[in-house]
Image (spheres, helix red, strand yellow):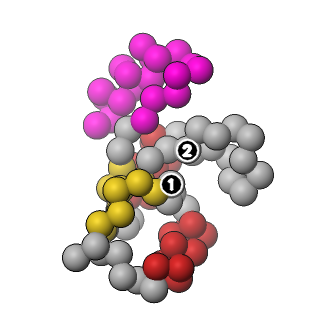
Amino acid sequence: MMIDIHTHVFSEHLWNTYQKKSKKLVSKIISIPYFNKESKDIPKIPDIEELLEFTDTHPNVYALGSIDMDDEIEKQLARHEELL
């Protein structure tokens, strides 16, 4: 069993692209919210709630909390504690 412990898969498009590129050889993935605000590939930065909703419908995808150092850290930590 192959496990990818660092991905940014949070949408059907990214999931399908990942599955195609990996030839479905990865059994489980851990997905992290993506904070690169300069990215042209991702039109909207997901929040942890969106990632959790995605993992609810994809049992082999697991969410990992991530904190944006350039934003309100205490507020983010409190929200992660509620959700995770």
Is residue 21 something one can see in this rendering? yes
Do the residues bearing badges 2 and 1 touch, measured as CB atoms within 8 Å? yes
Q: Earlier in the sequence, mark 2 or mark 1?
A: 1
Tell me: 4 left or right of 45.
Answer: left
Determine which residue is flagged by label 1. Answer: 8
Q: Is residue 30 above or below residue 77?
A: below
Residue 19 rendering spot, x and y as whole percentages: 48, 78
Residue at mark 2 to residue at mark 1: CA–CA distance: 6 Å
Q: Is residue 65 above or below residue 63?
A: above
- What is the quadrant of residue 45 in the picture? top right
Which structural element holds mark 2?
loop
What are the residue bounds of the magenta stretch?
66-84
Q: Residue at x 31, y 28 (%)?
A: 82
In magenta segment, residue 75: yes
Q: Label for residue 34?
A: 2
- What is the quadrant of residue 38 in the picture? top right
Q: Residue at x 50, y 54 (%)?
A: 8
